[in-house]
């Protein structure tokens, strides 16, 4: 039985189906052939973050379980499309085109529940994205890298989101290890 007072690192996110993991990993490997300074994210860690909580006492997360489950039940399945590569200063990601507004509303609903339960989370505006690579060298600008190789940044990868998860993140020297603590199903009356 887990210690309820244990401090864990947590976030809420949409997990990726296997076919998306495969396609995103192929894109990451293509990037790596051009730039060895990139560290490709492990496919098992692909997700779209809805709210990053960070360090939190495990038992405080119990208070959000029922409100988040109710939120999920009232939201229809979300169709998402990734159609291009985007960048933050040292991150390369797949950018959502279709489904961005619905994901932003879901993120806002989750963040509102966290706020009502006095569980702090990141305050960054929501941007639907799937991180596929990070720069090993913080000075490398991902955007400049993509321009310099005229990398083909257009494609179409679509899927439907029918759930999201509360995830524990344990940082290790080999990379993060994610453990799903709870899964929440959208439009639960239709999900079998």
Image (cartoon, helix red, strand yellow):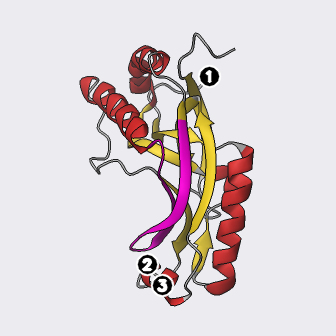
Q: Residue at x 51, y 47 (%)?
A: 48
Residue labelled with disc 2: 143
The percent coordinates of residue 95 (x first, y second) are 48, 57
Mark-to-mark CA distance, 2 and 1? 46 Å
Q: Residue at x 74, y 48 (%)?
A: 19
Mark-to-mark CA distance, 3 and 1? 51 Å
Q: Is residue 6 left or right of residue 39?
A: left
Q: Main secondary structure of the magenta part?
A: strand
Q: Is residue 89 left or right of residue 81?
A: left
84 part of magenta stretch:
yes
Contact, CB < 8 Å: mark 3 with mark 1?
no
Element carrying mark 2? helix
* Quadrant in which residue 31 is drawn: bottom right
Element carrying mark 1? loop
Highlighted magenta segment, given as a residue range: 79-99
* Between marks 3 and 2 in the image, the one whose residue lies nearer the viewer: 3
In the rendered view, tell whether residue 44 sits above or below residue 151: above
10 Å crowding of disc 1: few (<14), some (14-19), many (20+):
few
Element carrying mark 3? helix
Residue labelled with disc 1: 1
């Amino acid at each position: 039985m887990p210690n309820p007072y244990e401090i864990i690192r947590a976030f809420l996110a949409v997990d990726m189906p296997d076919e998306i993991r495969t396609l995103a990993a192929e894109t990451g490997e293509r990037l790596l052939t051009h730039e060895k300074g990139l560290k490709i994210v492990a496919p098992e860690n692909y997700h779209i973050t809805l709210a990053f909580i960070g360090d939190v006492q495990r038992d405080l997360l119990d208070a959000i379980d029922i409100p988040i489950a109710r939120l999920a039940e009232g939201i229809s399945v979300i169709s998402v499309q990734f159609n291009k590569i985007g960048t933050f200063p040292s991150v390369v990601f797949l950018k959502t085109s279709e489904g961005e507004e619905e994901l932003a509303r879901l993120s806002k609903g989750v963040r509102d529940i966290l706020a009502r339960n006095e569980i702090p989370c990141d305050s960054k505006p929501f941007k639907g994205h799937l991180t596929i690579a990070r720069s090993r060298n913080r000075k490398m600008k991902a955007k400049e890298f993509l321009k310099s190789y005229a990398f083909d940044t257009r494609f179409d990868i679509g899927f439907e989101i029918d759930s999201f998860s509360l995830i524990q993140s344990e940082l290790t020297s080999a990379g993060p290890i994610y453990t799903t603590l709870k899964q929440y199903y959208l439009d639960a009356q239709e999900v079998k």
